[in-house]
Image (spheres, rainbow, N blue to C red):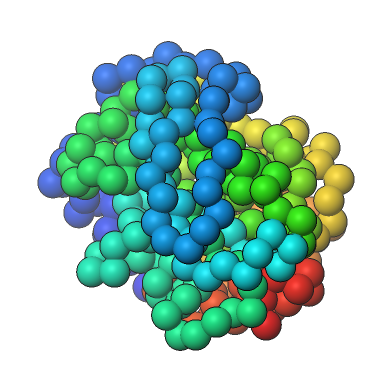
Amino acid sequence: MNRHGALDALTVRATAALVGPRIFSRRLESPPLAEHLDAVRLDRPPLTPGTHELVARTLVGRLPLGLVVAEWHGPDAPTLLYHHGSGERPDADDAATNSFRDVVRPADGPLGANCIAIRAAFHDVPSMAYLAAMESLDNFAAMVAASAALAQAVVEGLDGPAAVSGISLGGFVTNFHRAAFDTADAYVPMLAGAAPDLLFTASAYRHLTAPEARSRPGVLREVLNFEAAYDDAESGGVAPLLARYDRLVEYDEQRGCYDGMDLRTVEKGHVTAAVAHDALRAHLLDACADVGAAR
């Protein structure tokens, strides 16, 4: 194992030593992602500058979401819609981890496009409360579904071209939006694939996952995997990025959904790729520029 993969493994094991294997430890029952998505009810979000608090009605109850409209030129302008990684808050400038701030960097000046970020459910609470929510598989599935539904609500409010992107958790949401709706002009998933179930059974992340969940990979696959739907999507504007030595989003486990696509591979792990802000930004903006969603 090289230093990139070793850092991923060390990071997960250190976290597991502090909190234990808590993910899906309380509830392993859940409808599939598609059923969660069908059940989401969400009012049309306001597309005006500022941070907007929203509520999605889901199978697990009412979930608060956030929408950060950092730059707005009107519904006819091109749009970059971004989804953060797990544990991030795109609306918190003082957060230690904020890929919207560090990769998209709206504070650097106008992108020449609408610049919008989604804040996922369970990401308006302290980290331990978020971890407690992830003890239930249905909470995780509802979180992904609610974010995809919000992304679709934004896209439906636009007349210009739209690019949907995200990193890690946000990359899986990006891909799930394509599998479920396929309505954006471009998709830029980074450090993600279409098999989120494998994070919890076949990657270093399994050390954070409850033993019962690890021992029942078929359950996680039935609920979370959307590779078949992703293969059926017809849009060709996909610009994926994976890290070759990623021990969380395992390269060989996730790259299959990108067969025939122009997959960019960086020689890093999950942690080291996630902090390679300039490289991620360059990839994102290059992909968005192809559909006029960024200069």
The quarter of the rendered structure image containing the N terminus is bottom left
Q: How many marks?
A: 0
Along the viewing direction, whichever of 231 and 203 lies nearer the viewer: 231
Question: In the image, is residue 40 above or below residue 264?
Answer: above
Residue found 48% across the figure and 63% down from its top: 49
Q: Is residue 94 left or right of residue 161?
A: left
Q: Is residue 185 left or right of residue 166?
A: right
Where is residue 291 drawn, in percent x and y? 78, 69
* Extreme residue toward the left, this view: 18
Q: Is residue 128 left or right of residue 169?
A: left
* Residue 45 visible in this rendered orientation of the protein: yes
Where is residue 245 drawn, in percent x and y? 50, 65
Question: In the image, is residue 18 above or below residue 33?
Answer: below
Quadrant position of residue 140: top left
Residue found 25% across the figure and 65% down from its top: 95
Where is residue 186 drawn, in percent x and y? 74, 60
Residue found 67% across the figure and 82% down from its top: 295
Quadrant position of residue 280: bottom right
Residue found 76% across the figure and 44% down from its top: 182
Where is residue 254 drawn, in percent x and y? 62, 49
Along the viewing direction, whichever of 86 and 111 lies nearer the viewer: 111
Quadrant position of residue 265: bottom right
* Residue 148 visible in this rendered orientation of the protein: no
Question: In the image, is residue 254 above or below residue 211?
Answer: below
